[in-house]
Image: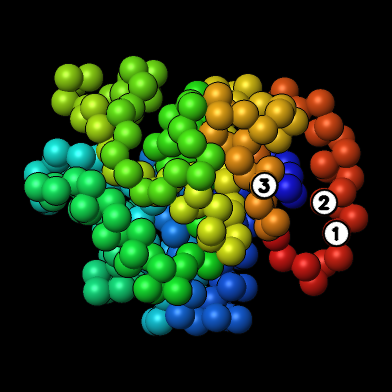
Amino acid sequence: MEIVIVPDAAAGGELIASAIADLLTRKPDAMLGVATGSTPLPIYRALEAKVKAGSLDVSRARVCQLDEYVGLPVGHPESYREVLLREVLQPLGIPGERFIGPDGAAEDIAGAATAYDQELAAAGGVDLQLLGIGTDGHIGFNEPCSSLASRTRIKTLTEQTRVDNARFFDSLDEVPHHVLTQGIGTILEARHLVLLATGEAKAEAVAQTVEGPLSALVPASALQLHPHATVVVDEAAAARLKLADYFRATYAAKPSWQSI
Ligand code: F6R
């Protein structure tokens, strides 16, 4: 794993947006896996600025969703499809036809999960998957003790995650209990994983992910199994890393031509 410590969330967003721009230069029809929540917003705003400045061409880029609430009606403003249309697709000018995701409103949820894994495979897989991290160490919505080999499936959110996400709803009662999420095995198939974590609330989960043992209790520790995983953290989220100075020195010594 490569660990990059940046001064703040905006710098993390800029760095990751630049890596995405490099990818789209090499592969204009790359499949970008996007996450929701607050953390990736600086990435999306940095991408939007590049598109508006004419330095990023997304005319062939494809986008896929990491996870989705189960049971929200189609078009609900907090369904992750709607959030991503609002925060990513529309600002970047990417049409909905180039966007795929799991159907959290399906009658047959198990079938929708399997269908999504098949759709991802048929699309040629994910080139770069953006990830946030939960305070409990989840990636996607693979809560603690998720199988490290899991595929897209329904999961029950922990109370902690529902409380963390209640800020997007009028009350805690409105936060769904279930989600469809790419499994850890599905996520590990992406060719490049890029996790962004910001703020001190994530410091313990980041330390466990990067320096702790591979453990089902910390689903993000599965990134240790991936040959190309980049973890970008701001100073606050890096606060509990024992090897922070080593990570800073390693990144500073990186050749300038090498993107994350
Ligand atoms: C969202 C997702 C989650 C979030 C995580 C952190 O699609 O997959 O894993 O990335 O819950 O959320 P924020 O960024 O809001 O702290």
Measured from the top left, where is residue 199 in percent x and y?
57, 29
Q: Residues within 10 Å of mark 3 (few under 14, many from 20)?
A: few
Q: Residue 137 vs residue 254: left or right? A: left
Q: Are marks 1 and 2 in contact (CB under 8 Å)?
A: yes
Q: Residues within 10 Å of mark 1 (few under 14, many from 20)?
A: few
Residue 45 in sight in this render: no
Which of marks 1 and 3 precedes in the sequence? 3
Identify which residue is drawn at 61% across, 40% down.
222
Q: Is mark 3 within 8 Å of ligand 1?
A: no
Instruction: Name above or below for residue 187 compared with residue 139.
Output: below
Say which residue label 3 marks: 225
**Which mark is in front, 3 or 2?**
3
Element under label 1? loop
Measured from the top left, where is residue 205 in percent x and y?
60, 26
Say which residue label 2 marks: 251
Residue 260 occupies which quadrant of the picture?
A: bottom right
The amino acid type found where label 3 is placed reads Leu
**Which mark is in front, 3 or 1?**
3
Distance in Å between CA atoms under marks 1 and 2: 5 Å
The amino acid type found where label 1 is placed reads Lys
Distance in Å between CA atoms under marks 3 and 2: 20 Å
Number of labels in the image equals 3
The amino acid type found where label 2 is placed reads Tyr
Q: Are marks 3 and 2 in contact (CB under 8 Å)?
A: no
Identify which residue is drawn at 43% across, 36% down.
142
